[in-house]
Image (cartoon, coloured by chain):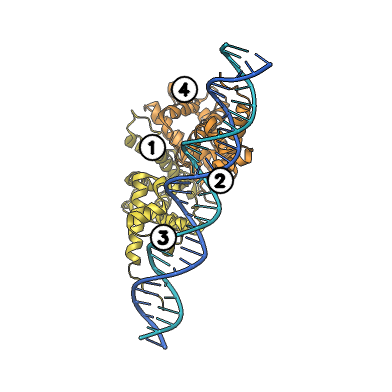
Chain colours: A orange, B yellow, C blue, D cyan
DNA sequence: CAGACCTCTGTAACGGCGTTACCAAACGGG
DNA sequence: CCCGTTTGGTAACGCCGTTACAGAGGTCTG
């Protein structure tokens, strides 16, 4: 005999949406339950009914961020050239991060105190990276890389993309540098470094 | 006719030291002025007299973190082989980050709300990376790399190190992988990718 | 159709936070 | 010796996340 869900779903979406906007436009410090509730026209208690608290709401943003991220990566078409596919994945990685820059630190830096990604949500999140894994595997099967485990190449590709994007978002890219071009060059260099001798 | 500095310097150091310990052992959420003052046996007002507020205290931790970081990097000897020197710098980079893992996000992720590194402190901090810059320049002069700007190679080396260390600290390294070995492999691959054709 | 019941959500409170106003104490200079 | 200045403690303010409590409003039962 529960009360039927009336405004719940709509309110839930409005809260999540507004939380994302607050985060994207004003950063992590601006995301307070009181302000969020006031903006949406409800009370802080709603967050506790619908989510369970602030960390739980942040958790939803976390999976949402990875979902968008996975969409960006999944949109990259697979061709018969895994090497070039990896480059395109890397470019999509950066585009996704720059699309909403405040979502990126939620995924990869623990920028929201009180929220620690548990193993379950983490593994769920990492599914966004399956295009990367599969393309690395395809590259190995195509004989592109030297004899190293797939995880090694995968972590290296992820690392260079994450590192450069993270540095760029934190303002550490030299001003006079063409960041986009440098980024792509670095992706290609990293890939070339793993190439089988003579390729 | 100012009152002489009596306990100031000692109290100042005790506060900074304790703040570093709190940060390293319990994370960013545990660093509150009230707790810090209580632990050191003073009052929160002392922080305002000695530093000017919490962001100012965090700023001191920020420069301290970069100072230790620069010490680690500066301890790497220069040889006649800039390529190998770069690898050793990369290894020192990771050692430094793992030495006190909670200091690393202070430098490169904005994990402390309310503190944003201004340009002055940022440029001062980046001096810790001068060994990296100089070694890249030495590599270019030695003809190690293809014809690309020093900043490009430098950013790439920094990016792969930062990216892998950051992923490792956030628990994203696959468990079955030998992270240290993979890290060094990735450094070498990245370097090889920039190498002049036929080197 | 009426009343019991459960869910939802607003009000108000609690403890903790950073910050600030105020003030007593401590020391150097005249 | 006392005055001026700095230091740092007490207490308050306005935030925050969280929670106890109560009222409102649909839903099933009789």
Helix, strand or loop at mark 2:
helix
- Say which quadrant the N terminus of chain A sits in: top right
Q: Return the residue at label 3.
A: B47
| Tag 1 and tag 2, C-beta contact below 8 Å | no
* Residue A36, visible in the rendered structure: yes
Depth check: A166 or A149 in front?
A: A166
Distance from the alpha carbon under mark 1 to that under mark 3: 34 Å
Q: Return the residue at label 4.
A: A138
**Side of D15 where D5 appears, left or right:** left
Sort mark 1 into few (<14), some (14-19) or many (20+) by Cα contacts within 10 Å. Answer: some
The vertical placement of B56 against A148, above or below, is: below
Q: Chain of mark 1?
A: B
| Tag of residue A56 | none
Q: Return the residue at label 2.
A: A30
Helix, strand or loop at mark 4:
helix
Helix, strand or loop at mark 1:
helix
Q: Return the residue at label 1.
A: B168
Q: Chain of mark 2?
A: A
Reading the chain from its start, which is encountered first: label 4 or label 2?
2
Sort mark 4 into few (<14), some (14-19) or many (20+) by Cα contacts within 10 Å. Answer: some
Q: Are marks 4 and 3 on the same chain?
A: no
Depth check: D4 or B188 in front?
A: D4
Quarter assignment of residue A102:
top right
């Amino acid at each position: 005999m529960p009360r039927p869900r009336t405004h719940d779903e709509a309110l839930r979406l409005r809260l999540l949406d507004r939380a994302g906007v607050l985060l994207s436009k004003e950063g992590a410090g601006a995301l307070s339950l009181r302000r969020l509730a006031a903006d949406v026209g409800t009370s802080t208690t709603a967050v506790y009914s619908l989510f369970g608290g602030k960390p739980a709401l942040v958790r939803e943003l976390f999976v949402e961020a990875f979902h968008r991220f996975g969409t960006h990566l999944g949109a990259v078409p697979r061709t018969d050239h895994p090497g070039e596919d990896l480059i395109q994945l890397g470019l999509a990685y950066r585009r996704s991060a720059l699309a909403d820059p405040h979502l990126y630190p939620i995924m990869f830096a623990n920028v929201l105190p009180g929220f620690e990604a548990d193993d379950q949500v983490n593994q769920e999140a990492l599914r966004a990276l399956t295009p990367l894994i599969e393309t690395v595997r395809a590259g190995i099967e195509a004989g592109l890389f030297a004899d190293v485990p797939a995880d090694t190449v995968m972590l290296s590709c992820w690392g260079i993309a994450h590192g450069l994007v993270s540095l760029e978002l934190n303002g550490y890219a030299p001003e006079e540098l063409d960041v986009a071009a440098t980024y792509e060059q670095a992706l290609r260099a990293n890939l070339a470094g793993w190439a089988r001798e003579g390729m």
